[in-house]
Amino acid sequence: MTASGQNRKAFVTGASGLIGSALVHHLVANGYDVTGAYTSDAHLYRLDAVRDRIRVVRMDLCDPTSIDAALENSKPEIVFHVAAAGVHAEGESDRIIRVNVEGSAVFARAAIRHGIRRFVYTGSGHEYEPRGLPMDESVPLRPLNLYCASKSSCWQMLDYLCRHEGFPLVTVRPFSVFGPMERETKLIPMVVRKSLAGETIELTSGLQIRDYVFVDDVADALRRCAEAPESAVLGEVFNVGAGQDRACSVREMVMRTIQLAGAPADLARFGKASRSRHEAPYFVADFTKIAYRLGWYPTTALVDGLTATIDYIRSQAE
């Protein structure tokens, strides 16, 4: 165990999600005293390995009383706001707005009242206007779906608090995050499961270019944003991705996954599925800023991340 956390108290919303749970594991390994907030028991299994070393609390982002109680009981120095509604579907538009915008506003105000010293907000690279080149933090925000529009709206509100009320905000915008405990309906877990079962896989054309970044690398970036000097990070936005050199098409990723799973290539059926959301044909991060400011680089190669994901899903099936 390293000692960078020095028992600093951290509060993680969305702690049972893919990014939130990886962050909790990473913080514990780095000496933090962690409280993880969640809304549903369904994915708490992601915290099983550290459950005896953290506190977990059920918290409703739309309930000020619930938020105040959680912050008062944990008394954190640092908040990582990872929780969001609508990551996987657009069906509940009212809830997406209520949780991601209104709930986050209530939560931010509570954080101010409770004297939080650093508020690390997890946005999304999909907030940016689509471009045919790697996107840095200067690209205008023009989201293509409601979820990312709500994340962008939340950031605008938090940024206002930062600029005008001294709110200690740092923002991270991850790109295409993946990892072993990703929800099974997402693309990579779906491809893995069907490959292991020998089932055909109906896909889009697969020509979209994506920036796949392993979830543990994202957790490391979030921690660095919490530990960096105020002068380096407060009020700043940092893209987190694998970058242009590691970007690949969805087709390439799928074929690599099928190969690593030991399945035949002809399981893939490209052009047989339609896209469920509006999405950019090219989605790649320029992470120069976080590399320069905080010394962060992605350390997990795509093949290693895919292998870890396959091994986990195979172990769960067995």
Image (cartoon, helix red, strand yellow):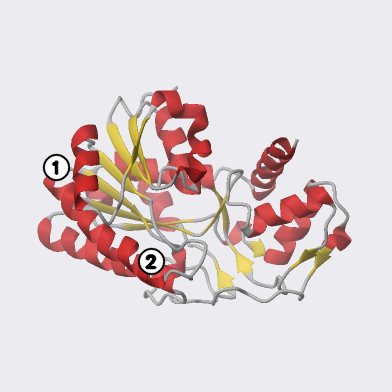
Disc 2, SS: helix
Q: Position of residue 1 (x, y in %)?
A: 45, 22
Could you say where residue 202 lies in the image, as x and y percent from the top left? 76, 68
Relative to 6, say whether 220 is above or below: below
Question: Measured along the vertical axis of the image, is residue 272 above or below residue 123?
Answer: below
The kind of residue tagged 1 is: Gly
Q: Which mark is residue 78?
A: none
Asked whether residue 309 appears in the rendered view, the answer is yes
Residue shown at 33% from the left, 61% from the top: 99
Answer above or below: position of 287 versus 13: below
Is residue 148 left or right of 255 when viewed as pictured?
left
Rendered location of residue 207, percent (x, y)? 69, 73
How many labels sit on residues? 2
Between circles 1 and 2, the one closer to the viewer is 2
- Residue that label 1 marks: 115
Q: In 3D space, how far apart are the residues under numbered discs 1 and 2 (Cα atoms)?
A: 27 Å
Horizontal relation, residue 108 to residue 54: left or right = left
| Amino acid type at image mark 2 | Ile
Secondary element at tag 1 = loop
Q: Which residue is mark 2?
A: 96
